[in-house]
Image: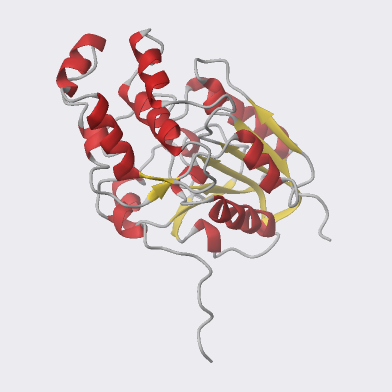
């Protein structure tokens, strides 16, 4: 019997295997979850478990989520598509013996339908090229969740008010951007604009170089490490796309699949760009 062709484009995988993607060096919140984000995820997951030992799925290898306080007796599986990322990241102390990692694509999960009580992720939508891929992820999460199961995901979402390149650098000069990682994500959102497709990473790098011809001078002014240019330089020449849908767009694609979609906006600066969405799986139709 001939193999069923995949529905998904995996051309971006080579970037993730190259070592240029992911947390190759320590990163700062809110690009990685802040203490507030971890506390919210813990509270949400513990409430969803209702005192039971749930089957839980972690999308990706976000350290803060993997090592957070899971409900007692949780059986946790993490799914990550890059072997390089797994080899580099998956050694986290404090996880239960029932925790393990599976190499697979989130849009084609190798898990049985209605097998999970809880699914958690961080920034997962943004590594896709378009809302179509985010919709495929949602479909797979809904498939593997049991009725009543919960999906909690922190999103990287461009604000409804919009961002411009000039506006981002005005915010930087005003001291309202705390670190180079936040600057990178806000600039990507500004270059992204209103398109429902993602932004090419090299285009973001070019916007950075146009605005900041002498990066070390900028880093010195803001007290950032002088070697912070690696943050942007790893996107030089990279033609894959990241997408930064608005929270409203993400709500639109979630509504047909989940019964009840809630949004939590953290209190820290720029929290509107890093909301958590909580979606519950209703009865199977």
* Residue appearing at x 54%, y 59% in the figure: 107
* Residue appearing at x 71%, y 59% in the figure: 114
Residue 206 picture location, percent across and down: 26, 37
Residue 261 picture location, percent across and down: 73, 38
Q: In this view, does 212 lie above or below 112?
A: above
Residue 14 picture location, percent across and down: 30, 59
Q: Could you tell whether 86 is left or right of 69 in the image?
A: left
* Residue appearing at x 52%, y 43% in the figure: 195
Q: Can residue 140 be seen in this view?
A: yes
Q: In which quarter of the image is residue 21?
A: top left
Depth order, front residue of 264/166: 166
Depth order, front residue of 264/93: 264
Q: Is residue 49 above or below residue 144?
A: above
Q: Quadrant of residue 93?
A: top left
Scheme of colours in the image = secondary structure
Q: Residue furthest top?
A: 174
* Residue appearing at x 67%, y 48% in the figure: 253
Q: Can residue 109 be seen in this view?
A: no
Q: Is residue 123 above or below residue 40?
A: below
Residue 183 picture location, percent across and down: 36, 24
Depth order, front residue of 93/226: 226
Q: Could you tell whether 244 is left or right of 12 in the image?
A: right
Q: Residue furthest bottom?
A: 1
Q: Could you tell whether 5 is left or right of 17 in the image?
A: right
Q: In this view, does 275 lie above or below 147?
A: above
């Amino acid at each position: 019997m001939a193999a069923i062709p995949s529905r998904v484009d995996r051309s971006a995988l080579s970037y993730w295997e190259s070592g240029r993607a992911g947390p190759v060096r320590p990163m700062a919140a809110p690009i990685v979850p802040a203490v507030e984000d971890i506390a919210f995820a813990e509270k949400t997951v513990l409430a969803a478990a209702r005192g039971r030992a749930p089957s839980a799925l972690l999308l990706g290898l976000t350290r803060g989520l993997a090592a957070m306080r899971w409900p007692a007796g949780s059986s946790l599986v993490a799914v990550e598509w890059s072997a390089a990322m797994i080899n580099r990241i998956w050694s986290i102390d404090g996880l239960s013996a029932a925790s393990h990692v599976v190499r697979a694509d989130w849009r084609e999960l190798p898990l049985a339908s209605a097998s999970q009580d809880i699914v958690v992720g961080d920034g997962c939508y943004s590594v896709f090229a378009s809302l179509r891929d985010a919709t495929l992820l949602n479909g797979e999460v809904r498939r593997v969740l049991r009725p009543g199961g919960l999906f909690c995901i922190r999103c990287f979402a461009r604000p409804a008010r919009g961002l411009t390149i000039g506006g981002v650098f005005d915010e930087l000069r005003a001291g309202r951007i705390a670190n180079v990682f936040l600057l990178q994500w806000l600039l990507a959102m500004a270059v992204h604009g209103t398109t429902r497709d993602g932004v090419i990473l090299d285009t973001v790098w070019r916007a950075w170089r146009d605005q900041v011809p002498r990066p070390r001078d900028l880093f010195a002014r803001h007290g950032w490490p002088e070697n912070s240019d690696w943050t942007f330089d790893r996107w030089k020449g990279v033609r894959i796309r990241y997408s930064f849908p608005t929270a409203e767009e993400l709500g639109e694609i979630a509504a047909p699949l989940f019964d009840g979609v809630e949004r939590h906006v953290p209190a820290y600066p720029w929290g509107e760009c890093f909301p958590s969405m909580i979606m519950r799986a209703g009865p199977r139709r």
